[in-house]
């Protein structure tokens, strides 16, 4: 009998936890996107692919900006079939190479007259360095999108009202920015164990939130607005570089019982991209299709400005 009660109690507890922390609202807006062009970085899998598919269904011209030609073209084909929209194409972009980012932007600006929506979705938690010698996590999750966004900003302004959306993470709440480490090592933290990578990942996601904060200020009066967000806890390939066995076990349990599918994970990205009337909330952070207040460091004007300047230096813009 006791055993039975414990089992029932566990089920109920699981249901409640799932409902509160895992379950995601569905974005119900019906905006159509005919004649609009969107870029989704890392659109070949996971949350990015689900987002790109939803935007294609609404009629947008969708550019999948991915590092692998083979994966990108395959995904573009699948999305065309699934959405019934032929206007989905792959363009090569490796966020771990500033040369690749510049060449992507050059090709894009030459061949595409419009840009209505830029979704900085690609991200990872892996060791190593980018082609430019920057720590991989800082480079791909922050410096790469920073450079890309800046290179495309003029086109976004010409097409205003337009938006930039940054897929950050609630993990940013654990992050902090160590400018000494960035200056001396071009990294967000030292070490290469899974714990170190996780810490650097949370720091990089704090960078995303701070950038959105600073970018919104710089965009005041342009009708280009920007948002950062947490997609939820989502089953995807994000944990692929985790190697230590206990971390893998934890990840497997979490993704089996405490995570949703990429379609649910795309809902807040869609909300920030398409919801009418949130323009006055430019620069803010969202989760589960609603505004969330971030901690003080994540909206500190001084830190945001300093990070912007360091980032300009790291990608040769200053
Ligand atoms: N899953 C979650 O629970 C969760 C929670 C919070 C935040 N997020 C954020 O959500 C975003 C999407 O993640 P996901 O969960 O969908 O992960 P995912 O399945 O691993 O997808 C990540 C995407 O980023 C791409 N990417 C990685 N490095 C790149 C580079 N150097 N250049 C261009 N593209 C690159 C990957 O391309 P390849 O396939 O070629 O590697 C892939 O398309 C990330 O920013 C992540 O931090 C996820
Ligand atoms: C997104 O994040 C990148 C890197 O952190 C930043 O450069 C860019 O300005 C951000 N854009 C928005 C809309 O927050
Ligand atoms: C921004 O949009 C408003 C309302 O549509 C318009 O009046 C204003 O001229 C626009 N500003 C710019 C810089 O495009």
Image: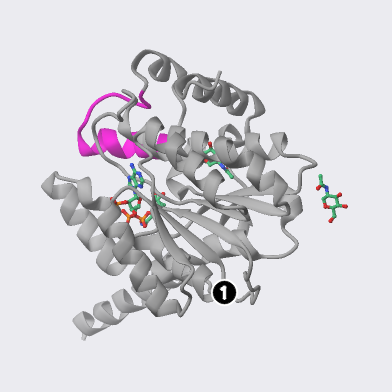
Based on the picture, tell me whether residue 191 belongs to the magenta stretch.
Answer: yes
Q: Nearer the viewer, residue 126 or 76?
A: 76
**Circle 1 is placed at which residue position?**
58
Q: Is residue 313 visible?
A: yes
Choose top left, top right, bottom left or bottom right for residue 93: top left
Q: Is residue 237 visible?
A: no
* Image quarter of the N terminus: bottom left
Is most of the magenta stretch helix, strand or loop? helix
- Kindly state the secondary structure of the residue where label 1 is placed: loop
* Image quarter of the C terminus: top right
Residue 241, position as x, y percentages in the image: 21, 46
Q: Could you tell whether 103 is left or right of 235 in the image?
A: right
Query: Is residue 289 shown above or below 209?
Result: below
Residue 166, position as x, y percentages in the image: 52, 48
Which stretch appears magenta? 187-204
Q: Crowding near pointer 1: few (<14 within 10 Å), some, many (20+)?
A: some
Residue 308, position as x, y percentages in the image: 57, 26
Q: Nearer the viewer, residue 22 or 260?
A: 260
Residue 138, position as x, y percentages in the image: 39, 32
């Amino acid at each position: 009998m006791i055993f039975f009660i414990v089992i029932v109690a566990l089920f109920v507890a699981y249901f409640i936890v799932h409902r509160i922390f895992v379950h995601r609202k569905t974005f119900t807006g019906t905006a159509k996107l005919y004649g609009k062009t969107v870029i989704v970085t890392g659109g070949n899998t996971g949350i990015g692919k689900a987002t790109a598919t939803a935007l294609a269904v609404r009629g947008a011209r969708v550019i999948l900006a991915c590092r692998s030609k083979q994966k990108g073209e395959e995904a573009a084909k699948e999305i065309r079939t699934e959405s019934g929209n032929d206007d989905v194409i792959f363009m090569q972009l490796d966020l771990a190479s500033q040369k690749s980012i510049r060449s992507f932007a050059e090709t894009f600006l030459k061949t595409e007259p419009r840009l209505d929506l830029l979704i900085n979705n690609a991200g990872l938690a892996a060791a190593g360095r980018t082609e430019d010698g920057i720590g991989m996590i800082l480079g791909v999750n922050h410096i790469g999108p920073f450079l890309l966004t800046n290179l495309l900003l003029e086109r976004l302004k010409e097409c205003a009202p337009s938006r930039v959306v940054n897929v950050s993470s609630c993990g940013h709440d654990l992050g902090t920015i160590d400018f000494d480490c960035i200056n001396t090592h071009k990294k967000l933290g030292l070490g290469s164990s899974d714990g170190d990578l996780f810490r650097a990942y949370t720091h990089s996601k704090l960078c995303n939130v701070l950038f959105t904060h600073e970018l919104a200020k710089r965009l005041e009066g342009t009708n280009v607005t920007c948002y950062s967000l947490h997609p939820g806890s989502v089953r995807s390939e994000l944990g692929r570089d985790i190697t230590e066995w206990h971390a893998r076990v934890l990840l497997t349990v979490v993704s089996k019982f405490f995570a949703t599918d990429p379609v649910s994970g795309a809902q807040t990205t869609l909300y920030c991209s398409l919801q009418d009337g949130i323009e006055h909330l430019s620069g803010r952070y969202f989760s589960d299709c609603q505004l969330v207040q971030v901690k003080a460091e994540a909206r500190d004007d001084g830190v945001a400005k300093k990070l912007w300047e360091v980032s300009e230096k790291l990608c040769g813009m200053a």
